[in-house]
Image: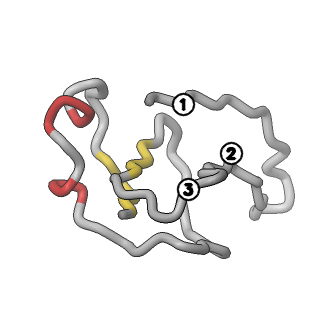
Amino acid sequence: MVRKTEKEVDTEDGETILTMPSLECLGVVRQTGRVGVVKTASVELSTARVHGLARADALEIPLALRAQTDRPIVLAFK
């Protein structure tokens, strides 16, 4: 799944916190897979709250999904 998000932000204060889309699996005992995040703007990304996911190497994301973007994957989770 590819999820695209665009949001206009006011950058006058020098730091802006954005709430990104969330993923939630309902009614499952165990869910496996990988999630990757790419960016198209010159911004710094960090994670404040991550529940139920562990950091992963971008190379752990299947090639078929990595091929859907021409940008580097900057955050990856499993």
Q: Which residue is mark 2?
A: 21
CA separation in Å, label 2 and label 3:
20 Å
Going 80% across and 41% down the picture, which residue do you hit? 9
Quick check: 57 above or below 28? below
Q: 21 above or below 45?
A: above
Estimate the x, y position of residue 42 in percent, counting from the top left: 51, 45
- The circle drawn on residue 28 is 3
Q: List x then y, in percent, for residue 67.
A: 20, 28
Q: Is residue 77 above or below residue 61?
A: below
Question: On the rendered structure, is 51 left or right of 61?
Answer: right
Q: Earlier in the sequence, mark 1 or mark 2?
A: 1
Residue 71: percent from left, percent from top = 30, 35
Q: Residues within 10 Å of mark 3 (few under 14, many from 20)?
A: few
**At which x and y percent is residue 23?**
61, 49
Q: Secondary structure at mark 3?
A: loop
User: Can you tell which quarter of the image residue 72 is in?
Assistant: top left
Q: Tell which of 46 and 76 is nearer to you.
A: 76
Q: Are marks 1 and 2 in contact (CB under 8 Å)?
A: yes
Q: Could you tell which of marks 3 and 1 lies nearer the N-terminus?
A: 1
